[in-house]
Amino acid sequence: PVIRREDYQPPAWLVPETGLDFTLGIDAAGITSKLKVVRNPEGSGEAVLRLNGDQIAPLAVRVDGAAVNDWRLDGSDLLIDLPGAEHIVEVETQVNPAANSQLMGLYASNGMLCTQCEAEGFRRITFFPDRPDVLSVYSVRMTGDKAQFPILLANGNCTAQGENADGTHWAEWHDPWPKPSYLFALVAGDLVANHATFTTMSGREVDLNIWVRPGDEDRTQHAMDSLIASMKWDEEAFGREYDLDLFNIVAVSDFNMGAMENKGLNVFNTRYVLADPETATDGDYDAVEGVIGHEYFHNWSGNRITCRDWFQLSLKEGFTVLRDQLFSAAMGSEAVKRIEDVRVLRSAQFPEDSGPLAHPIRPDSYQEISNFYTATVYNKGAEVIRMMRTMAGPMQFRKGTDLYFDRHDGEAATCEDFIRSMEEGAGLDLTQFRLWYSQAGTPQVAVTLKHEGTTATLHLSQTVPATPGQPDKQPVPVPLRIGLFNRDNKEHTGEQLIVLTKASDTFVFEEFDHPPVLSINRGFSAPVSIEFDRPVEDLVFLAAHDDDPFARYEAMQSLVVQHLVAAVSGALDEAARAEGRAAIGEAFAAIVTDSALEDLMRGELMILPAESYLAEQMLIADPGAIHAEREALKAWLGREYAQILGALHDRAVAVLYSRDAAARGARKIKSQALGYIAVGNNAEGARRAIAQYRAADNMTDRQGAMLVLASLDVPERAEALADFHSRYEGNALVIDKWFSLQAGSFHPGVLANIRALAEHPDFTMTNPNRVRALYMAAAVNPKAFHDESGEGYRLIGDLIRRLDPINPQTAARFVPSLGRWRRIEPVRAAMMREELQKIAAEPSLSRDVREQVTKSLG
Ligand code: ARG
Ligand code: ZN
């Protein structure tokens, strides 16, 4: 069952109004829907109404008030013949929220009821044309036990509520904005709110509530501050104002993804709401801010303008990720945010783009849409729109987004609609640029720079690699911000934007008496990989002097990548190895000691490239060799620079806790320095880590110390882990960390430890956060996952098979790690493939896992 983009047909019937009546119960909930359906003048004219369903049965069907019996099922869809052009259709269904372990549709979490409908969960509640281009105005009524469900929430505004004599109560909600079914939400449970108000730019008073379980309310202020900041920022940066009098956010602990932008009632994974210094790291605070912003920004890029079909998913997700990135950059350090975003892109999206699951940001086909909530659709999607912004400039870009919001408000739009608004509003010609939407694969740009007389000649050529189903590619426009540095005064002649549109091209620069140093793809202006073979001293120069912070980071990364790739390929003799290390050491020491650098940036620059990114640089990777070489370099840096790293750690330890940038920077370099020190000298690392752990008055320091201890084979390790567990017993989000930091460790016994943790009383397969805490940490831990025994692959293979019947969507997320087998050395590759084959042999796989495994075996 492959769904294709080119097969899109407008809906035959529209549903201008939807009434839903819920009788709430944890293990039985009754739903009566009342749909006003009208024939779509733009539709096929079909007389049959198709209502999608999934694992539900129609208990009663009425048309225009009269019971009908001649309905039929086509698979799980309900078909009803309708003679006229307009009817009222009523359907009764019943579901068991407590038994809903997939967490799609209406489900129970910690005694409360909540919904997740994107992408196709609504059809697990009631029969409906469950597609994003059918927009309806919803009125919802719900009745439930007052003691069990004191709070009753749905989209929009509460219009009436009351009590019944039997101990139940009811509420009616109305959402005036037409929306697709995937934005429907309902929540019922024992909840308390952090309440605030926000006045919009046109003077609308909005009530804001963040709903959590009693006891969690003290950890909601950062989320509330982030929400208010998001609302303000979207007014200023994009001219977007909130459009209801009420905005509710609910935190739930069982959730497949991060959060969901349901109109007026966002539902969040607790991990993106709850934060206080004792239990959340600085990274967690940033994630809360980013996701709160992301979901809020969807109110315009997603809700007011939604997607015509799911192939257009990047229309809302790519754009909204860009918006949340710009927001977080504005709230903190733009440079650090950019580096973090690029690191995510390279570690999550580049491997996707070069593997068996590669797809364009606007896919052409899918079997299960849940599998397309990917780093490609989200993060590469954001990069593609960011390139438009780079080419147009921020002012013109804003004109483009203004036109888009204005022109398509209230519509279910397409990526093409967005592109056209950008062409007309921002004044760009995006004819060739559209290829970024249709072609998968990360473009490779080869660079050479020649100098003769006073002329510098830059030669660029590009190839877009073949991907599954796309053997031949065309060149794409690649906007590159560049600078040419004078080696003597360490300045460049002014940044320029050049756009490579052809397969290869030459750019000439005059008046250079000496060969300049090229800084290219500054700010990561294009999501490409740059191949530029250049002298080590140029990279050392840029790592020390580039005024573009991203380019400076990039130079440092390239220096390390070049060295480690050569080392892993066995291309380095002792002398060359020493020479390479010395160059890296020189740049590293400069970063550690540069007093002009802010610590947040210093911490960023100190991070070595990830093993997955190093593997990505090689056609066939040997994960064992990569791990050994990277650890060896880290140990060498730790020993060679023990003194300055110790001094850096000491300085950071002396900084008192606060949430300001300087103190956050201090905590960042504290963990970085500790990491190097510990790999270089285990005993000294353990001593410092224990001291840091004991003195910690915040989770960043405590977790930073634990991360280091968890990888060390020292007696203090077990004691600290036990202390951490007992200190946070009952705090699910922190116990998640306890699982993750062990599963992610480089401890020699890591695999046995993971198997043991799976038997721990705190472990459960029914909570996605807990499953990810243990197994995703293991799957991205190169030492555990790629252990030469193959045990890591078996661990993940077993997990997928056991999780699939419980929660297919989350199970499918683990398949891509095994799907990398073609790029791994043959012995490991065979074992990875074997795991995929074992999964494929399961008799009743979900559509989610089936699609990923089939494609991965290729
Ligand atoms: N639209 C949500 C977001 O990006 C993601 C929801 C996806 N959920 C799912 N079950 N596939 O904010
Ligand atoms: Zn989103």
Image (cartoon, grey):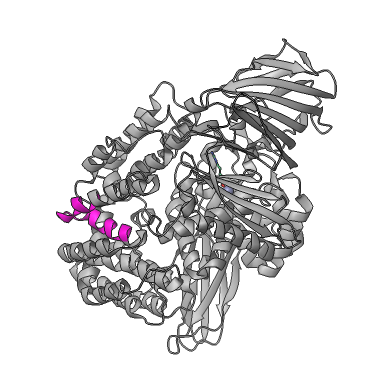
Q: Is residue 840 left or right of residue 502?
A: left
Q: Position of residue 43 (x, y in %)?
A: 79, 31
**Does residue 722 show up magenta in the picture?**
no
Task: Give the image quarter of residue 125.
Answer: top right
Q: Position of residue 254 (x, y in %)?
A: 46, 38
In which quadrant will I find the C terminus? Answer: top left
Of residues 402 and 660, the one nearer the viewer is 660
Of residues 201 and 581, the one nearer the viewer is 201
Q: Is residue 422 above or below residue 188?
A: below
Task: Give the image quarter of residue 815.
Answer: top left
Residue at the image position 56 percent from the left and 84 percent from the top: 510
* Residue furthest out toward the top: 69
* Residue furthest out toward the front: 165
Q: How many numbered discs?
A: 0
**Does residue 712 show up magenta in the picture?**
yes
Q: Is residue 556 visible?
A: no
**Magenta-tinted stretch:** 702-721
Q: Position of residue 629 (x, y in %)?
A: 25, 59
Q: Is residue 750 above or below residue 275?
A: above
Image quarter where ligand 1 lies: top right
The chief SS type of the magenta part is: helix
Task: Give the image quarter of residue 306.
Answer: top right
Of residues 154 and 419, the one nearer the viewer is 154
Q: Is residue 762 left or right of residue 228?
A: left
Residue at the image position 23 percent from the left and 48 percent from the top: 722
Q: Is residue 41 left or right of residue 372?
A: right
Q: Is residue 693 visible?
A: yes
In which quadrant will I find the N terminus? Answer: top right
Q: Position of residue 524 (x, y in %)?
A: 51, 65
